[in-house]
Image: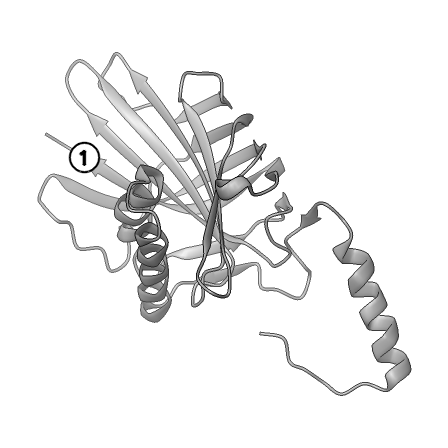
Amino acid sequence: MVNCVQYPSRILAVALASVAAAACSDSKGTGPSNTPETIVLTTGQIASLRSSAQAIANSDPANADLRALVDSTLGVLTAGVEARRLDVTTNLTTVPLYFVGLHRTASYSTHSWSTWTLVGFDDPSHLTALVEVSGFAQSANATPPSTVVGTIGDGTGIVNALMIQVASGGAVTTWRAGSGTAGFRSDTPGAACPNFTPPNPHISCALETKHVQFSANAASGSSGAPARQASLSTEASVAAMRLVYTP
């Protein structure tokens, strides 16, 4: 939250002019230097994220992407997970975006698969902008893939991206990317996920570091909203929860 201070009129005029000039840019980095690099999500922030996401999903009950965001992504985040600020270039929002990752794996005797999800949000206590990038890979052996690189919109569905904006009145606008690229690479898992209660004995969770890079472009959004884009041009690392599914 920005602390408001009273300025002399001349200084205020200069400040407002600077803000107005910046607002004319089509695309902005979302990582000002006065924001923390990482935040550790609290119980209250997790609850708020889930509540906001549920409201987003309820705004369009037939939208499977929004329902998956609630049920499969934000629904499994736990308190104590670290979110990292990434300097994403985007015209979705001008405020910092903090990212967390999910990595799911399943292994069988003859095949295995992995999915990756990267979720970025502005304010975990009052969600108004969200970026989601996902990827999928499979293998013909029992070792789940640890990396994937793909092209958004090439027809394979290997990588995808979604951008969401929530207006002050609650109206939700969504953009599904039609072009771009995405890459995920996961390190070896480490400590157990904090505050994670497995829903059944076939699921376990450990923390890992995930390396990500992406560009996502949507020509238009819901209700004819104009184009939006988000990109991370240099590979960056984020904390991720690895959910391991076993038979």
In the orientation shown, which residue stands out farthest toward the front?
Answer: 223
Q: Is residue 116 above or below residue 173?
A: above
- For image coordinates 24% across by 60% down, the residue present is 195
Question: Left or right: where does residue 174 sit relative to residue 64?
Answer: right
Q: Nearer the viewer, residue 238 or 26?
A: 26
Viewport quadrant of the N terminus: bottom right
> Quadrant location of the C terminus?
top left
Q: How many marks?
A: 1
Residue depicted at 26% across the width and 41% down the height: 243
Residue 87 placement (x, y as % from top left): 63, 48
Decide if residue 73 is on the left or right side of residue 164: left
Residue 96 shown left or right of residue 46 in the figure:
right
In the displayed structure, 48 sits above or below 24; it is below
The 10 Å Cα crowd at callout 1, few under 14, some 14 to 19, many 20 or more, is some
The amino acid beneath tag 1 is Tyr
Q: Nearer the viewer, residue 243 or 172?
A: 172
Q: Residue at 60% of width from left, 53% of height from top?
A: 93
- Residue 180: % across, % down: 57, 27
Left or right of residue 196, residue 93 in this image: right
Name the spot of residue 71 as percent of width and height, x first. Answer: 26, 47
Name the residue rendered at 27%, 51% in the picture: 76
| Residue holding disc 1 | 245
Position of residue 53 relative to residue 231, above or below, is below
Q: Position of residue 162 (x, y in %)?
A: 46, 39
Quadrant of res 217: top right
